[in-house]
Structures are given as structure tokens and as C-alpha cells.
Amino acid sequence: MYGYKAELSEEEKDRIIKDFLPLIKYTAHRLFWRLPPQLTVDDLISVGLMGLLDALEKFEQGRVKLKTYAEFRIKGAMFDELRAVDWVPRSLKKKINALKNTHIKLERKLGRLPEDEEVAEALELSLDEYYKTLQDADGAIAFRFEDFVEKVSAGDSLNVMECIPDPNAKNPLSILEETDQKEILSRLIDELPEKERLILSLYYWEELTMKEIGKVLDLTESRVCQLHSQALLRLKSRIKN
């Protein structure tokens, strides 16, 4: 989409920023449900702009497309910010692990996906406490792209940016692996309760916000978040299993 040279004029930078601003705002709003209390959507938008400016400073023509690199750094900057203000205490992380393990045990015992009430009872939590833990778990997952810099030998590292493939040049093995992963994930999603399947479809495929999904399904935004978290927890438990 973009063919900008490495050295950009201020006018070109302003034009690029204007082009990317809708994407930055959209990405920030998509991450709204992960925000800890001390961050706002506007904070993420500002961080995304800083990520874009950093991308423009470091971009090298010919290695990857500017659009690919800039989107990578915008999202990376936002996730970095979420990671930097990680507020999740160790006690909450233990609760999240307990949720996953309890889901696995109940599914094996019952031979089906457990209901919310059954999981809450097994954890000796009230239903409200269970939902509160699910909501808190939403903000507990954040990644830095630096986490994916892998050591290849003593003193050397492999920059993930150098491994971004051309999206139009997939090899047969990658196509096979991707197809296999999609089939597995599709099968697991098909096994979810209908309402949870619909929420995942509306959120990830139709790209509606939690609030918009609530209007479609006549549910509160909070309840949509709970069901979304429940669906992800079920999938993680099944994948782990």
C-alpha cells in the first residue's frame, strides 16, 4: 500500500499519520476490555501514535512493507504499555490457573462442558465472584513483541521483524500447518455453547465491539464480556487438555 522512502519529510510523516490514525483508534478501542483502571482509550491512542513515529524512524525500505511494519509497531507499543502497567497480583494469577484446571477436571468428570454454576461451586465461589474473576482475567494477558526475540546462539538473537514472511508467498508446509490449526480451532469452537460461539463470531469475524454485540444479543456489555471470557477459558482448557 505504501512505498515511502526511508528518509521522510515532515509533510510525508503528517500524511502517513493521518492515514494510520483510523487504524490506531480502531485498535485502541478493540483493546478497551483489557484496560486496567489507570489507562484510558485515549492513552492507548497516544501510545499507538508513538509506536507509529518509532516505526517511521526505524523503517528500512526493502525489508518489509511500511504498512506491515507500522501496524506491527503500533500494536506492539500498545501491548507494551499494557504490560508496563500490569496490575495483576499473584493471587489473581493463581485464581486464573485454578479456573483453567477446574474446567478440565469437570469436563472429564461430566463428559461435557461445565456450566458456570458448576465451575463456581467447584471453586467454592459465588457466581458473582466467579464472573468477577473472569472479568479480571481479561486484563491479565498482555504481550511484548520483545518476548518473541529468540536466542539462536550465545550472544546472538533473532529479531522477529526479520522473520515476517511475505503474506503472498506461503509455502506448502505453512499452508498445511495453518489449515490443520484452523480445523482444530474450528472444531473446538463448534463444541462451545451457541451463545458463546455467536459472541466469538461477532467479535473476531464481524469485528463488533462488546457494546455492539450486547445490542445485537440484547445483553449488557458486562454480560457479553463474561461470556467472551468464558468462551476463551473453555478453549484454553480444551487446548491444554
Image: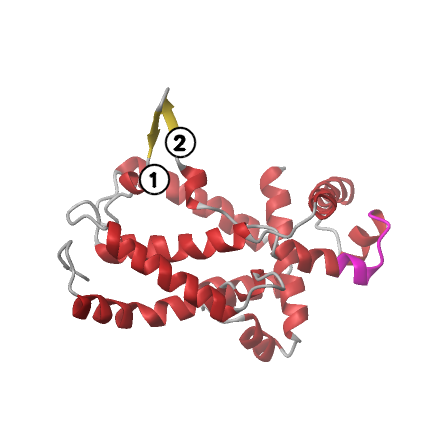
> Percent x, y for residue 228?
61, 61
Q: Residue at x 14, y 56 (%)?
A: 7
182, above or below 139, in the image: above
On the rendered image, what quadrant is the C terminus found in?
top right
Q: Does the magenta run of residues contain 63?
A: no
Taking 27 as reference, is 125 left or right? right
Q: Nearer the viewer, residue 18 or 9?
A: 9
> Percent x, y for residue 149?
39, 36
Q: Residue furthest front?
A: 10
> Percent x, y for residue 148?
42, 38
Residue denoted by label 1: 160
Provide the residue span drawn in magenta.
123-131
Q: Earlier in the sequence, mark 2 or mark 1?
A: 2
Q: Nearer the viewer, residue 208 or 10?
A: 10
Q: Residue at x 49, y 66 (%)?
A: 43
Residue denoted by label 2: 150
For the residue labelled by badge 1, is the local secondary structure a helix, a strand or a loop? Answer: helix
Q: From mark 2 to mark 1, how far is it between C-alphas?
A: 8 Å
Q: Residue at x 57, y 64 (%)?
A: 33
Taking 133 as reference, is 196 left or right? left
85, above or below 108, in the image: below
Taking 90 as reference, is 189 left or right? left
On the rendered image, what quadrant is the N terminus found in?
bottom left
Label pair 2/1, CB-CB below 8 angstroms:
yes
- Please state which amino acid type lies under the numbered disc 2: Glu
